[in-house]
């Protein structure tokens, strides 16, 4: 039995490579006695210098693990993980306890930093706490660049399939007789730009305000709400101001509202711009507009209809505007698409002597 397990296991590698780097000096050792095991892993190379120790209690009723890791240096470029010349290091502590039907986890890092050819950037402390039980999950994350929490009532593994069924019902009109799983979810996330992330993933990001994300979902009531808000962001020569997304679902209606106050990316300059969509079980009403100052530049509305694997698009003739000018289109315009099939009927747009049309052979 596990209670009688006692001994020592040491592993030596004659040959061990990763991305052409020799890891054969890796130290791996396990000592076990009286339901306690100590794991040691260490390697000291010029591309990876790490030491890890873990104390594992393999009690069948109350298993647990405490671990500490000191990653003194990891050369991401030398190991082929990134193209830039980046080295990083941090200290990590973690605890895991409980059985699979009620698992608790805590992981935190400290003294983290990464270095490039030019500068050293602190990572800041990161702390993750989680409880994953059969019918409830709580996750909290705290760091300089990301703060968030997630609560799920019900089976966590069923959340994504439940959301998929919900959106397929609202947008595509697929059969939905009410979700048999009573799943509820709440999430709040704040994402901030920091020198650490910018240099590692987005070196051309000039600046960005905090991104706020909220989500709430109730499967049985068919209620869904989510918002994304970003006050401003600058990437190279492109600047985006007051970007927001709102998705609201109640019963048999799903609405999507997306827009921004200004987008500049030479030669493009767009002021207030918005996109709206209402979906009701396979039928969608879409609208888009953009302004330059107080002048309406573009405006278009359309209807979408989903039937099985076929989708039909019809542009609404009323209020059609392209490049500040009113345009016309036949009331019976239509585009029908299905796998290996495309039909375009009267999909023509006119403005006095100007004409744009689409045809199929």
Image: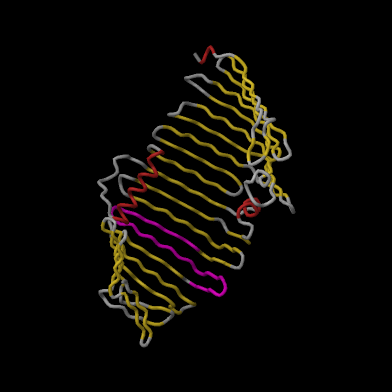
Q: Main secondary structure of the magenta part?
A: strand
Residue at left offset 64%, top offset 31%: 68
Residue 244 inside the magenta-drawn segment: yes
Image coordinates of residue 221 in percent, x first then y, are: 30, 47
Image coordinates of residue 322 in percent, x first then y, are: 41, 78
Q: Nearer the viewer, residue 318 or 214?
A: 318
Where 202 falls versus 333 (above or below)? above
- In the picture as drawn, the residue positioned furthest to the bottom comes out as 353
Q: Going by the image, does 209 lie left or right of 348? A: right
Where 94 falls versus 276 (above or below)? above
Write the start and end of the magenta stretch as one range.
243-271
Picture quarter containing residue 205? bottom right
Residue 132 inside the magenta-drawn segment: no
Where 127 falls versus 249 (above or below)? above
Image coordinates of residue 130 in percent, x first then y, are: 50, 36
Image coordinates of residue 344 in percent, x first then y, are: 30, 71
């Amino acid at each position: 039995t596990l209670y009688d397990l006692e001994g020592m296991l040491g592993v030596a590698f004659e040959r061990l490579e990763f991305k052409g780097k020799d890891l054969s000096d890796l130290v791996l050792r396990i000592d076990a006695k009286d339901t306690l095991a100590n794991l040691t892993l260490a390697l000291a190379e010029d591309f990876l210098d790490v030491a890890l120790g873990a104390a594992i209690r393999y009690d069948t009723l109350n298993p647990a693990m405490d671990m500490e890791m000191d990653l003194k240096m990891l050369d991401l470029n030398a190991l082929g993980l990134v193209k830039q010349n980046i080295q990083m290091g941090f200290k990590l502590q973690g605890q895991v306890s409980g059985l699979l039907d009620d698992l608790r986890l805590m992981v935190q890092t400290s003294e983290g930093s990464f270095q490039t050819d030019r500068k050293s950037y602190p990572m800041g402390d990161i702390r993750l706490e989680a409880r994953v039980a059969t019918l409830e999950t709580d996750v909290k994350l705290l760091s300089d660049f990301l703060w968030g929490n997630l609560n799920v009532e019900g089976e966590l593994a069923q959340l994504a399939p439940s959301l998929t069924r919900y959106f397929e019902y609202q947008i595509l009109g697929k059969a939905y007789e009410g979700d048999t799983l009573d799943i509820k979810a709440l999430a709040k996330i704040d994402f901030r730009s920091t020198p650490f992330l910018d240099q590692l993933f987005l070196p051309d990001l000039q600046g960005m305000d905090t991104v706020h994300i909220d989500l709430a979902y109730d499967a049985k009531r068919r209620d869904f709400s989510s918002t994304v808000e970003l006050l401003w962001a600058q990437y190279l020569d492109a600047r985006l101001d007051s970007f927001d997304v709102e998705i609201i679902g109640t019963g048999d209606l799903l609405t999507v509202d997306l827009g921004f106050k200004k987008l500049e990316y030479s030669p493009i300059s767009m002021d207030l711009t918005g996109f709206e969509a209402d979906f009701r079980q396979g039928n969608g009403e879409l609208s888009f507009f953009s302004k330059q100052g107080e002048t309406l530049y573009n405006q278009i509305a359309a209807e979408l209809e989903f039937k099985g694997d076929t989708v039909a698009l019809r542009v609404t003739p009323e209020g059609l505007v392209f490049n500040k000018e009113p345009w016309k289109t036949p009331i019976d315009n239509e585009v029908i698409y299905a796998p290996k099939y495309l039909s375009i009927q009267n999909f023509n747009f006119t403005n006095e002597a100007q004409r744009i049309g689409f045809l199929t052979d």
